[in-house]
Amino acid sequence: MSPDPTPPTIAKPPTTAPQPQAPTVPPTTGPAPQPGVAPHLGPAFGVQPEQLEAITRQWHQAGSDIDKYAWSFLSEAAGEGSDVFAAVRDCPDPAKQAMNSIATRFSTMADLVDRFRINVIEKDAEIAGEIGKLSPRG
C-alpha cells in the first residue's frame, strides 16, 4: 500500500476588506407634536434629506468595500485528482463577476437615492413657495 497523499489545502481568504454593514439612518428630529395636530402630519412627517444622504453614503461605501475583495486565493487551492478542487480553482473569475455586480447594484441604488434626495429638496422648496403665495383665509 502506498503512503497517503498530502492532504489538500486551501489558502485562507484575505481579511483586509471590511464587512459591509447595514445602513443606519439618523433619527428624525423636530419639535414635539402640537396638541390637536394629527400625529401622522406632525413635524416628523416625510423624508429627511440627511437620512437619504446617510443611506447614499453607506451604500456607496458598501459597494466600494465589496469591490475590494480579492478572489485569487481560490485559484491556489491545492489537491490532486479532485473535481471539487478543480471547480474551486475555477471560481475566482465568476466570484469576482458576481461581486462586481453586487457592488455596481449598491452604487446604482445609492445614486438613485441621492437623486431622490435632490428632487425632494427641490420640490419641497417649489411647493413651499406655492403654498406661500396662497391668500390668507379670514
Image (spheres, rainbow, N blue to C red):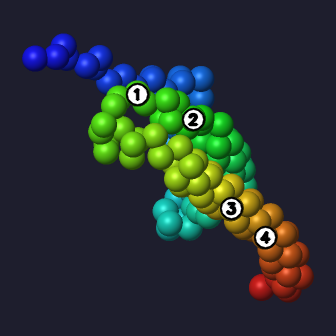
Q: Nearer the viewer, mark 1 or mark 3?
A: 1
Q: Nearer the viewer, mark 1 or mark 2?
A: 1
Q: Which residue is mark 3?
A: 108
C-alpha span from label 1 to label 2: 13 Å
Estimate the x, y position of residue 65 in percent, counting from the top left.
63, 38
Q: Along the line of sight, which residue is nearer the eye, 12 or 8?
A: 8
- With 123 as the anchor, is 55 left or right in this view? left
Q: Up-down: is 121 above or below 96?
A: below
Estimate the x, y position of residue 53 in percent, counting from the top left.
72, 50
Q: Nearer the viewer, mark 3 or mark 2?
A: 2
Which type of secondary structure does the marked residue at label 4 adopt?
Answer: helix
- Residue occupying the far top of the picture: 3
Tell me which numbered mark, 1 or 2, is placed earlier along the sequence. 2
Question: Quick one: label 3, few (<14), some, or many (20+) residues within 10 Å?
Answer: some
User: At label 4, which amino acid type do we have?
Assistant: Asn
User: At label 1, which amino acid type do we have?
Assistant: Ala
For the C terminus, the image quarter is: bottom right
C-alpha span from label 3 to label 2: 26 Å
- Which residue occupies 45% across, 23% down? 11
Residue 72 numbered tag: 2
Question: Quick one: label 2, few (<14), some, or many (20+) residues within 10 Å?
Answer: some
